[in-house]
Amino acid sequence: MLKIVASMMTAAIAIVCGSQAMSADYLAGDFQKSRGYSTAVATEGGRTIWMAGEGGIKDTKGNDISNNTPAQIEYIFGQFAETLKTYGGTTDDIVKMTVFIKDQADGTPFTQMRKKFFPRGNYPASSLITIKDLAWPGMMIEIEAFAVIKDACTQGSCSAKPSP
């Protein structure tokens, strides 16, 4: 009996999720894609990882990266990658980000730079907020992120959108 139920559940997941390998449904138009974010991201099940805000003025080798926004972005995404690896995930599993920057001029360069951390083009839903200061002098950016790893559709694409 248990075997029959497991087979039925596997079949149901396959029907609901389709055949493409993707763990979330990303809703984004051309403008959103050009800025490296999605309007919304839908997931089903999986393990949610809530990552605290990351930022820093020293890289992993102890080099000073104060006032160096690109180096700080690299550092932050490196920290996210290490954290997610602990749970069996990657930065591709990030579904939501809140980004705090000190200088509005860093907004567009950041949106272009972050695309490289999502090579499949599935960008997280994101907020970009300019603020006066961050935790330490020289800190230019802080990002908090949420990821969903191995959701119910790891074997396919869950989508509220009808299949063609």
Image (spheres, helix red, strand yellow):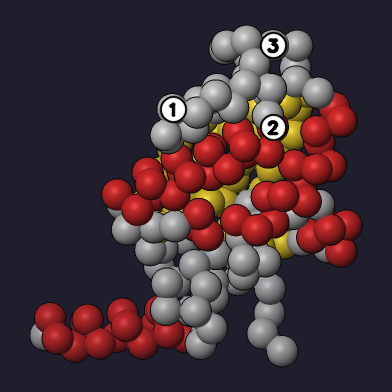
Name which of mark 1 and mark 2 comes first in the sequence.
1
Q: Which residue is mark 2?
A: 69
Label 3 to label 2: alpha-carbon separation: 14 Å
Q: Nearer the viewer, mark 3 or mark 2?
A: 2
Q: Residue furthest left?
A: 1
Q: Is residue 39 above or below residue 83?
A: below
Q: Is residue 142 visible?
A: no
Query: Mark number for residue 137?
Result: none
The x and y percentages for residue 83 are: 37, 44
Q: Which residue is mark 3?
A: 133
Residue at the image point whose x is 25% and y is 87% from the top: 7
For the point 77% across and 51% down, the residue is: 112
> Going 55% across and 64% down the picture, which residue do you hit?
24
Residue 9 x %, y %: 31, 80
Answer left or right for 29 relative to 123: right
Q: Amino acid at mark 1?
A: Gly
Residue 144 image offset from top left, x and y in percent: 55, 33
Considering depth in this image, is 93 or 67 the residue closer to the camera? 67
Judge by depth and name the residue closer to the eye, 32 or 8: 32
At label 3, the amino acid type is Asp
